[in-house]
Image (cartoon, grey):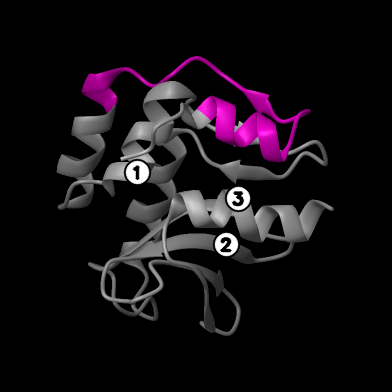
Amino acid sequence: MLAVSWRDVVLAVLPSAQLTEGAPPGALSAAGDLLGAPLPDDLVAMLAESDGIRAPDGQDLVWPVARIVHDNTELRELPEFKERETLVVFGDSGGGNDRVAYDAMSPAHILVWDRDTDERRPVAVDLADYFTRVLIEDYF
């Protein structure tokens, strides 16, 4: 369990990140119901503090819960989208068609997924690792 708030973690890494009010608890539990499995605990905790996080360059590092549900529902309709049940796409990564996703079946649960090639590159073991290590490398 994270000893500090997600807002503190994000702002320590990206002081000019844009945060919002937290997502309503009902929206977070409904998201899991709509996607057929609960969202990862750390993602739920982060969304409860800020329903989406935007980087200084405009990139949506963490999408609002409504977009997570919308985009994942659309992706799961595509026949070419593999491993639909284990992958939850939740943010942008580097522009283009790269997305950040949570994969329950991967030892490194956070990965960057290239929608064009379906390449999945593990980048972090959890959301805290992603924010404190990967994004620091990307933005500094």
Label located before the other in sequence (3 or 2): 2
Q: Look at mark 3 in the image and give the residue it sits on.
A: 132
- The image shows residue 8, relative to residue 134, as above or below, that is above
- In what element is the residue under mark 2? strand
Quadrant for residue 15, please give it: top right
In-image side of 7 versus 125 (left or right): right
Mark 2: which amino acid? Arg
What's the distance in space between the residues labelled 3 and 2, CA to CA? 18 Å
Could you say which is closer to the camera, residue 133 or residue 116? 133
Please give the label number shown on residue 134: none
Marks 3, 2: nearer the viewer = 3
Which residue is disc 2 drawn over? 99
Quarter of the N terminus within the rendering: top left
Closer to us: mark 1 or mark 3? 3
First in residue order: circle 1 vs circle 2: 1
Number of numbered callouts drawn: 3
Residue 57 relative to residue 28: left or right: right
**Residue occupying the point 73% across, 37% down:** 14
Q: Are marks 3 and 2 in contact (CB under 8 Å)?
A: no
Residue at position x 43%, y 65% from top? 125
* Percent coordinates x, y for residue 81 in the rendering: 38, 75
Q: Amino acid at mark 3?
A: Thr
Q: Return the residue nearer the eye: 8 or 34.
A: 8
Quadrant assignment, res 25: top left
Name the residue at the front extreme: 3
For marks 1 and 2, give the one nearer the viewer. 1
Q: Secondary structure at mark 3?
A: helix
Is 117 magenta? The answer is no
| CA separation in Å, label 1 and label 2 | 18 Å
Q: Residues within 10 Å of mark 1 (few under 14, many from 20)?
A: some
Q: Which residue is mark 1?
A: 42
Which stretch did the figure color magenta?
A: 7-27
